[in-house]
Amino acid sequence: MSLTPQTYWAEHAWLGSDVESCVVIETAASTGRITAVRPAVEIPPVGAVSLRGLTVPGLANSHSHAFHRALRGTVQVGAGTFWTWREVMYGIARGLTPESYYELARAVYAEMAMAGITCVGEFHYVHHQPGGMPYAAPNAMGEALIAAAGAAGIRITLLDTAYFSSGFGAAPDPHQLRFSDGDAHSWAARASGLKGSAHARIGAAIHSVRAVPADQLATVAGWAAERGAPLHVHLSEQTAENDACLAAYDRTPAQLLAEHGALGPGTTAVHATHLTPEDIALLGTSGTTICMCPTTERDLADGTGPAKQLQLAGSTLTLGSDSHAVIDILEEARALELDERLHTRGRGHWTAAQLLRAATEDGHASLGWPDSGRLEPGAFADFTTIALDSVRTVGPPPRLGVEAAVFAGTNADVRHTVVGGRHIVRDGVHQLVHNVPAGLAAAIGALRP
């Protein structure tokens, strides 16, 4: 990622506890990191770029399937279930090539940058050609995603996903052949060929306990542990998955993962919607992070997970846009609190600052970027500025800027996004990808029958 030295002057900035005013943020070109943060500098230094509004650490999208963006709007016609939605998703997956996936992902990641997202966790499982034949370059699809993130100016953790079966004890169905490497050892051999870069890190994922047989879970978990790489897994998103797991193994998915060493501080469980009290205790005491995706979970009628109970048990919470019904991490953050209010009929489960921390520092850490998500010297110079004068956010005093942003702001209020000290979105306009809506329209249109 090309870096440009720059000093920024933030009208207001959240420094992790309080909102400070007139904050100078100095960055280093050689490292893309923050070298100094100085509040109460009322006159911007000569040459500084002014950021009007509330500047916060860059947002982390901890769970993404980039190609699902092509489903937006098209899956809202008529009734259906998660399983009928999945059939439509398979149709989109069949049309992807490395070239078309690059074009789509570049536009999707540009949309993320415009929403203040500086790092994405891409849960990637479309590995091979339709029919299952590997590409000449075995990681052509993953490499296309890494290149797309670089072209859009954001960081990526490619969570290369093990996905071998369509259900407990079943082979992949025809829709899933391009997802499967056959077994965990073949998956590990291919995934080991992926290389990180300045903007990209490589992690692993277990698609779900229904997609990876129990005797192969430890191989995937061990691959990640040996490399100190993040491990992510879809967990108990659907009650049908839980029922099938109990029938096959006489254990819940969480219990099965725990038995095979797939839970712990390096693991993020995505969704964690339908859990027993014992599951909650297992996840919490193991230090497993939980990624909630509220807009997808409600879009697919999955239900709301026991987020507060998980946090109290010891799990850190993060946020993702998953199927991209919308790409708006501010919406995901407030939905975490609002869903809990609906569930408990009580208010005040998390402060705005706690929700913002889930969307920033904790999300980056779960993706293997512990040096992101804070506005402090030594951290990566990744930050975003949210307008405090829009029709949604205007009114509260600046000291309540975090409350205004989290509980009223949207992706439309993002004015600036900076990654590695480089201005990627300026005044709402992406600086690297020309006409993002047109790029999305073209890339999605190319995938339609």
Image: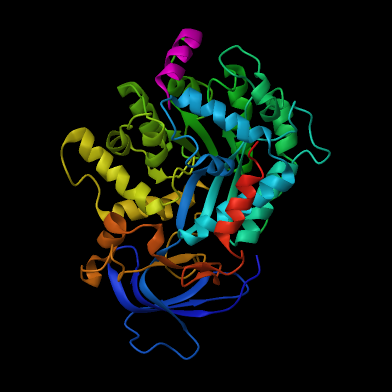
State the image coordinates of residue 433 (x, y, percent, origin top left). 61, 64
For the N terminus, which image quadrant?
Answer: bottom right
Q: Quadrant of residue 43?
A: bottom left
State the image coordinates of residue 254 (x, y, percent, origin top left). 44, 24
**Which residue occupies 33% across, 21% down?**
276
Residue 180 visible at all: yes
Is 88 magenta? The answer is no
State the image coordinates of residue 406 (x, y, percent, origin top left). 30, 56
Magenta segment, which residues? Answer: 237-249
Residue 265, compared with residue 404, is above or below; it is above
Between residue 197 and residue 101, name the one nearer to us: 101
Question: Is most of the magenta stretch helix, strand or loop?
Answer: helix
**Which residue occupies 79% across, 32% down?**
134
State the image coordinates of residue 396 (x, y, percent, origin top left). 20, 67
**Which residue occupies 58% across, 24% down?**
217
Residue 183, compared with residue 304, is above or below; it is above
Residue 338, compared with residue 198, is above or below; it is above
Picture colour scheme: rainbow
Specify whether 18 is left or right of 426.
left
Between residue 290 and residue 51, name the one nearer to us: 51
Q: Quadrant of residue 193?
A: top right
